[in-house]
Image: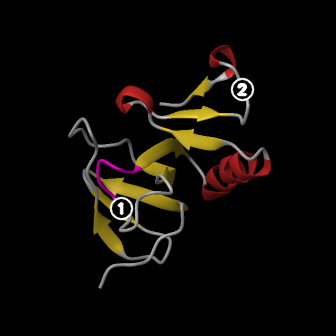
Amino acid sequence: MDADYDLFEIVKIIRDFWLFDAESYQRRYRTTQNQPLTPGYYVVAWPETIRARRFNEQAAFHGPFNLRQEAQAFLATMQGHKYLLIKPHKRWALSAPNAGPNEDLKVA
């Protein structure tokens, strides 16, 4: 059974293409580059338009963080500043509302 994820989840990458989700289930993941992520904690974000949220090329993995608390702090900063996630040209960026193009903060 698949979990119903929020727009943001904190996960732990444990090895190539495997992670533990927020509910401690081990799941496979995919990236747009088909490259494994470095082990650690990540904040995963999906566009609001995605209904079935999976750990695939529609998910943006922000990290790695060494500690879960670091990932939680990053997530709180994202939510506290009301950042919007956009996906221009297959690259994720954080953009503050009403910000001009030079005020965007790019996130790997």
Residue 104 relative to residue 24: left or right = right
Residue appearing at x 47%, y 71% in the figure: 5
**Residue that label 2 marks:** 99
Residue appearing at x 47%, y 30% in the figure: 108
Over which residues does the magenta segment extend?
A: 55-59
Residue appearing at x 69%, y 20% in the figure: 100
What's the colour scheme? secondary structure
Residue 30 colored magenta? no
Residue appearing at x 34%, y 50% in the figure: 58
Looking at the picture, tell me which residue is in the foreground, 52 or 45: 52
Other-residue count near label 1 (Cα within 10 Å), few / some / many at <14 / 14–19 / ≥20 = many
**Residue that label 1 marks:** 19
Q: Earlier in the sequence, mark 2 or mark 1?
A: 1
| Residue 104 higher or lower than 94, as above or below | above
Looking at the picture, tell me which residue is in the foreground, 43 or 79: 79
Check disc 1 and report its element: helix, strand or loop.
strand
Per the model, the C-alpha gap separating discs 2 and 1 is 34 Å
- Picture coordinates of residue 26, whole percent (x, y): 33, 72
| Residue closest to the far right | 80
Residue 2 relative to residue 103: left or right = left
The amino acid at mark 2 is Ala
- Picture coordinates of residue 25, whole percent (x, y): 38, 76
Give residue 87's quadrant in the image. top left
Q: Nearer the viewer, mark 2 or mark 1?
A: 2
- Picture coordinates of residue 82, whole percent (x, y): 74, 47
